[in-house]
Image: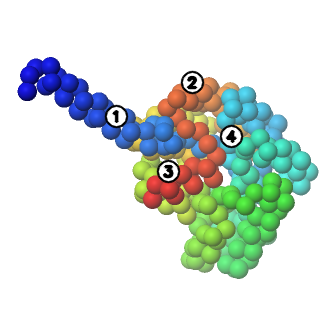
Amino acid sequence: MNLKNTLLLLLFFLAITTGTAQKEIRKWNGKKCGVVLTYDDALNIHLDKVIPMLDSFNFKGTFYLIGASPVVANRIDEWRAASKEGHELGNHSLNHPCDGTLPGRGFVTSENDLSKYSVARTINEVRTTNTLLKAIDGKEERTFAYPCGDLTVHDTLYYSYLKNDFVAARGVESNYLPAKEVDLSNVNAFVQIGTTAAQMIAQVEAAEKAQSFTVFLFHGVGGEHALNIDLEEHRKLLQYLSKRKKDIWVAPMVEVAKYIKTQQ
């Protein structure tokens, strides 16, 4: 083999190797990592500030609505409009029941104490909320978010009875996992409380380094909830994600969960 043919062969193998390496690091819908922006509890600030901000960057978020919230009842048309623009309306239960027996749960009332619920009541309230959400957005597919991250009712994993009702369920434990290892019944998420843009960007970069994805779990964004981040810090995160659209896939939870399922 002459020198020219040897060089051509080397270039050929180099091209194959490079292509394979690029494919390996772009495992998230052709991007290096995935990002999901989720917002809990159906707050006015989500409609007034967050959705307009997301729309200005052409990003779509997932809003986990509490079915009995007055912000749902009083602003149905606006939630419907948000869905038509591509935002996901997720299920965050009917009354947001949390286990009042756990430490730090002084905010739990007797009416929404999960420790006093039956499994059947829990399931029925979640399904009732699905019916309400479908009446708002007409969608058949959506995701669930555990109120307070509580997975069980009297030691029973109640979502096991709801798996056919949802594409996935978001939890509150943080981790960076490859798609094949993601538990779609308890998707990892990073709770944001007083977090700066720099800290949130670091979480995205950690996900990218791990060839994984990150789910941001927001409540208040500029107020209206004790678990809050600054509105301007949120804007800075979106500015960063916008600049890196070529490498970072930003999508609602239902879309990312469906993609993960295809990889498992």
Answer above or below: position of 247 versus 66. above
**What's the distance in space between the residues labelled 2 and 3, CA to CA?**
25 Å
Near mark 3 (Cα within 10 A), the count class, few <14, some 14-19 or many ≥20, is some
Residue 244 in the image: x percent, y percent?
A: 53, 27
Pointer 1 local density, CA inside 10 Å: few below 14, some 14–19, many at least 20 = few
Point out which mark residue 19 bears. 1
Q: Nearer the viewer, mark 1 or mark 3?
A: 1
In percent of width and height, residue 79 lies at 83, 47
Three-letter residue code for mark 2: Lys
> What secondary structure is found at the residue carrying circle 3?
loop
Q: Earlier in the sequence, mark 2 or mark 3?
A: 3
Badge 4 is on which residue?
60
Q: Position of residue 109 (x, y in %)?
A: 76, 65
Q: Nearer the viewer, mark 2 or mark 3?
A: 2
Is residue 109 something that shows in the picture?
no
Residue 174 is labelled as 3
Calculate the distance from the C-alpha at mark 4 to the C-alpha at mark 3. Answer: 22 Å
Spatial CA span between label 2 and label 1:
24 Å
Q: Secondary structure at mark 4?
A: loop
Q: Is residue 93 left or right of residue 250?
A: right
Local secondary structure at mark 2: helix
Cα separation between marks 4 and 1: 30 Å
Sequence-wise first label, 4 or 1: 1
Residue 8 location, quadrant: top left
